[in-house]
Image: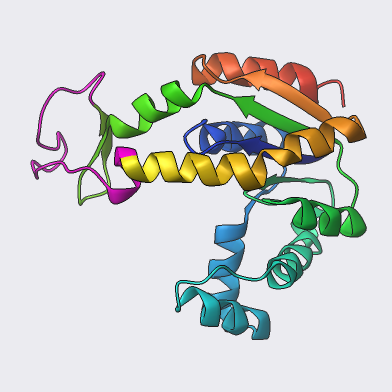
């Protein structure tokens, strides 16, 4: 089973990716993890990618594609995989088409207003714990007692920019995969478990 997970930042892709990978026993592949692995191993492509990352620049598509291609050729992908964070653009999707076929593209749809509320309500502790003001009403961490703070990524202006980038570059992939007949839209405004039930109904037919 070869699956792509689409959705805006804050749509809940991470939670669904974990459930899908565990339930179907396929590796969850994120480009971030693949980059970090290649950089840690000091591979030629990892060193090249790092040269862009260190300058705060976007890694070129051809480098991203080479890293993903290498990851898909590893033994644990023989029975399928779940791609999260790739492709991010039409050129990347076209490159992926040349590498492999895709069985299903799950697009988690969440209202941008809901995403903004989700992310701006997050509070983080330096120990790694994370909370949401809708369910946790203290200013200090329940685990270690340190003060909670708002990550830069969770500030409203940053979120608006991230969503705008998504709308311009990644949202066209919805149309791209719909035209290929492999796109399945899932209402992500519900709970994590309810969303997974809908995702499972789709993938169980594959």
Placement of 38 over or under 168, stated as above or below: below
**Which residue lies at the image location 43% right of the left edge and 22% below the top edge?**
113
Question: Number of callouts in the render?
Answer: 0
Q: Main secondary structure of the magenta part?
A: loop
Q: Quadrant of the C terminus?
A: top right
Q: For residue 135: magenta?
A: yes
**Residue 52 location (% of width, % of height):** 54, 77
- The answer, for residue 110, to whether it is visible in the render is yes
Placement of 157 over or under 179, stated as above or below: below
Place residue 201 in its image quadrant: top right
**Residue 69 location (% of width, % of height):** 78, 65
Place residue 68 in its image quadrant: bottom right
**Residue 159 location (% of width, % of height):** 39, 40
**Which residue lies at the image location 91% right of the left edge and 35% below the top edge?**
180
Looking at this view, is 37 or 184 the one in front? 184
Looking at this view, is 193 or 155 the one in front? 155
Q: Which residues are magenta?
A: 133-156
């Amino acid at each position: 089973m070869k699956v792509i997970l689409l959705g805006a930042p804050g749509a809940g892709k991470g939670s669904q990716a974990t459930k899908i990978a565990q339930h179907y026993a396929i590796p969850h592949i994120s480009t971030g993890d693949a980059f970090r692995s290649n950089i840690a191993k000091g591979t030629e492509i990892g060193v090249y990618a790092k040269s862009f990352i260190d300058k705060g620049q976007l890694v070129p598509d051809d480098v991203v594609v080479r890293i993903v291609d290498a990851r898909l050729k590893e033994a644990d992908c023989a029975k399928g995989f779940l791609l999260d964070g790739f492709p991010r653009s039409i050129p990347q999707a076209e490159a992926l088409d040349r590498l492999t076929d895709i069985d299903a593209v799950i697009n988690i749809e969440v209202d941008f207003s809901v995403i903004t509320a989700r992310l701006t309500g997050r509070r983080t502790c330096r120990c790694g714990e994370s909370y949401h003001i809708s369910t946790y009403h203290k200013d200090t961490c329940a685990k270690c007692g340190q003060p909670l703070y708002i990550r830069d990524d969770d500030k409203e202006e940053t979120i608006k920019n991230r969503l705008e980038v998504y709308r311009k570059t990644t949202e066209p992939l919805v149309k791209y995969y719909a035209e290929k007949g492999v796109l399945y839209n899932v209402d992500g405004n519900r709970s994590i478990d309810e969303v997974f039930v809908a995702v499972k109904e789709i993938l169980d037919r594959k």
